[in-house]
Image (spheres, rainbow, N blue to C red):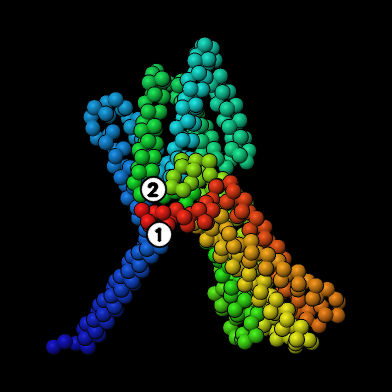
Amino acid sequence: MTTAPALEVQSSNGVAAASCMERFGSAADNLRRSVVGFAAKLGKIARDDPRRVAHALKVGLALTLVSVLYYVTPLFRGFGVSTLWAVLTVVVVMEFTVGGTLSKGLNRAFATLVAGFIAVGAHKVADLCGDKGEPILLAIFVFLLASAATFSRFIPEVKARYDYGVTIFILTFSLVAVSSYRVEELIKLAHQRFSTIVVGVLTCLCTTVFVFPVWAGEDLHKLAATNLDKLAEFLEGMESECFKEDTTSEDLESKAFLQVYKSVLNSKATEDSLCNFAKWEPGHGKFSFRHPWGQYQKLGALCRQCASSMEAIASYVVTLKKSQYPEANPELSSKVRTTCGEMSLYSAKTLRELSEAIKTMTVPSTASTHMSAAVKAAKSLRNELSEDAALLQVMHVAVIASLLSDLVSQIKKINDSVDNLAKLACFKNPEKAQKEVVINIVS
């Protein structure tokens, strides 16, 4: 017969087992949710830009191709253990864009070649000083060249385009110069390492250029057009949501058009990186080798200035709508709002036209007409509010009008910048482009 203590022990064991099973089930469920969430995140990354999947496969392909040097015995005998430098080169050189890979690859190859020559020369000179003087002279060479090369990285032009190459120069020179004191066949070792690095760089370049290439220049070109579209979207929203007579002030802060300019403000780092890589790329598609990539940086700076002004306008508009200040002169306020709507509408049309001109690489034909209309509206508004009495009656609306007037001036600079880009990049005339399309259809 089972005693009471034994029953209590059995009951306690059953509760503990049930608790353990519950915890195990909860942990398994959490793990499953984490795996599903991670898979969904990976899927979203791939869907947002399928080129990322292609890049991952290209890196795998390049590493597989360069590994042949290690697996095939005749090739391994020719290069020796230095074959691993080819694998290392692929890992550190392969970039998402063609320009990025070219930048790193050429920097690495030339820096290795120059550093190798100088290091061998330093070894020959140090060797003349005998066994006691050689390590001292080698140390002096390493100190002087490493210090000078490191200081050169602070030069803006060097930092922008050759920073990676200078780093590789310091690394290669130091390794070769220091190892020359113990290695007998220095020139053979340097030759093997340089040869395998060149093989790695060429493998990266061939894979990047000929297998689903991603051009930094194209991305920069698209970014410029996209930024103009976002600025235009803000102004279109202002015209339809803020300056029409039948607009309401409900939930204005949550409107999407008041947030679109923020990505333009944060685009500088991406823009500078793409511009730097684009300068390394050969001619491709519609872009020649000497395409004026620097002009895109100037255009981007103007777009960010414009977005900064939009931030001030958005903040003031939201505050004004919440406050609901009474209007001392409703008729004049209505007239000011109408003019502000015209400025916004014509400025938005200008930006849309400029964006389309960049996308199609044609000279903007009607942008100047819209720009003139926006400037005319801004001048008319300034004349309307030139008197102090009129200005005081519509003070709150006049602040927005003043900010919009300044914005029109900035958009005019953007218009001039795109015109300059069209001249430098030899954009096609719209009429000529249309004739070519007609000829192609007829033929």
Q: Find the residue positioned furthest to the front.
A: 442
Name the spot of residue 284 as percent of width and height, x first: 44, 45
Question: Which three-letter amino acid code belongs to the residue tagged 1?
Answer: Asp
Is there any visible trace of residue 140 in the rendered image?
yes
Residue drawn where x is 46% and y is 40% of the image: 282
Q: Is residue 226 above or below residue 388?
A: above
Q: Find the residue positioned furthest to the left.
A: 1
Q: Where, by quadrant of the figure, is residue 77 drawn?
A: top left
Q: Is residue 426 left or right of residue 301?
A: left
Q: Nearer the viewer, residue 84 or 351?
A: 351
Q: Is residue 318 above or below residue 306?
A: below
Name the spot of residue 332 as percent of width and height, x first: 76, 83
Number of marks: 2
Q: Nearer the viewer, mark 2 or mark 1?
A: 2
Q: Mark 1: give few (<14), some (14-19) or many (20+) Cα within 10 Å.
A: few
* Residue wearing tag 2: 213
Which image quarter is the N terminus in? bottom left
Q: Where, by quadrant of the figure, is residue 346 drawn?
A: bottom right
Q: Secondary structure at mark 2?
A: loop
Q: CA distance from mark 2 to mark 1?
A: 14 Å
Q: Is residue 405 above or below residue 269?
A: below
Give the mark nearer the N terminus: 2 vs 1: 1
Name the spot of residue 84 as percent of width and height, x first: 34, 35
Residue drawn where x is 70% and y is 63% of the image: 409
Question: Which three-letter amino acid code belongs to the residue tagged 2?
Answer: Pro
* Residue wearing tag 1: 49
